[in-house]
Amino acid sequence: MAPRVTITDVALAAGVSVATVSKVINNRYGVAIDTSERVHGVIQQLGYESSLVARSLRSHRTHVIGILVAEFEPFSAEILKGAGGALGDSEYELLAYTGARRSGGTGWERRYLSRLSGTLIDGAILVTPTVVDVDAGVPIVAIDPHTGSAELPTVESDNLTGGLLATRHLIGLGHRRIGFMAGRPDLRSSQLRETGYLQALAEAGIEADPSLVRNSDFRLETAREPARELLSRPDRPTAVFAANDLSAIGTMEVALELGLDVPGDLSVIGFDDIPEAARTTPPLSTVRQPIQQMGAVAVKLLVAVLEGRQTESHHVLPTSLVLRASTAPPR
């Protein structure tokens, strides 16, 4: 591995002092234009990059925003895309961090923040944090926190309306036995999607059947066995609303293994509209929550806090129905 280029290397190559290079890097006065241009050329040629820790010690700011997630999966990947796009040409950079799922569980964000705050990041965005009473010493914005909106600046989707839209769609097609693949029971957004499911059934005069509800934990691999139990029943549902797209995709895969046609024998609708939803066979009908926009709004909210600007602290983004080929009237 090639040795790291240092500020001394830049100074030697440019024929100036280390102090002069420091002035150029930090846009300070006292350096001639031609000297500054020469130093910038050497910096680009050598690929010099000042360390975050050194930058922090000099200015008490790193201009780095941390995005902390329990794991990298399709939802958090879309959040990162939106956050990165929102930074654009700003002075801030993005650091994505995860301790992997083995470091998950309640309170994972406290452990992550203790490693990053103080020298590496100026502020943090927590994606689906389990707790929000985190004293990190840096500003924090939460996306889809487990407990719902709190004192922290928060960005989330209208999950209740999304649950209503999905279930009303299935009812409108003529379905009466509608299963529900629930998400994580400790997550407020998951609870709201289930509430929307139950409210839509009640509106239509359909009695909710608890035996048609299964917990999928929002993961493809953990959705398969609950889906198999649900679809192997002699009185199986004719439609399933899954609380996220991964659970819906898992349900469709199990239906195929059981010889069920989607949507002929079983209609399936998901929630999220991750990129994979449009690539299933058949393409998955779903409820779109604007995931990339959630990341973008969170970044803009955090930057506003860092710069001392007043801003609305709680953002609820609308959800909408995306109809594809996985839903149809029952046979």
Image (spheres, helix red, strand yellow):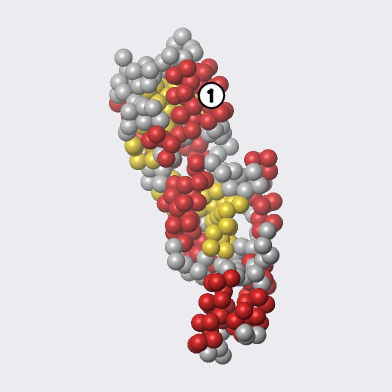
- The quarter holding residue 268 reads top left
Expressed as whole percent of the image width and height from the top left, the position of residue 218 reads 53, 34
Q: Is residue 233 left or right of residue 106?
A: left
Task: Say which quadrant the N terminus sits in.
Answer: bottom right
Query: Is residue 295 or residue 152 the one in the foreground?
Result: 295
- The quarter holding residue 114 reads bottom right
Q: Is residue 22 visible to the viewer in this orientation of the structure? A: no
Q: Is residue 66 visible to the viewer in this orientation of the structure? A: yes
Expressed as whole percent of the image width and height from the top left, the position of residue 49 reads 60, 69
Q: Where 32 falls versus 290 (above or below)? A: below
Residue for point 59% across, 43% down: 71
Expressed as whole percent of the image width and height from the top left, the position of residue 118 reads 67, 64
Q: Is residue 120 left or right of residue 206?
A: right
Q: Which residue is mark 1?
A: 224
Residue for point 59% across, 65% down: 122
Amino acid type shown at disc 1: Arg
Residue for point 67% across, 62% down: 2
Q: How many marks?
A: 1
Task: Say which quadrant the C terminus sits in.
Answer: top left
Q: Is residue 213 left or right of residue 23?
A: left
Expressed as whole percent of the image width and height from the top left, the position of residue 179 reads 44, 22
- The quarter holding residue 239 reads top left
Q: Where 8 falls versus 111 (above or below)? A: below
Q: Where 264 falls versus 96 (above or below)? A: above
Q: Label 1 crowding class (10 Å Cα cut-off): few <14, some 14-19, many 20+? A: many
Residue for point 38% across, 17% down: 261
Q: Secondary structure at mark 1?
A: helix
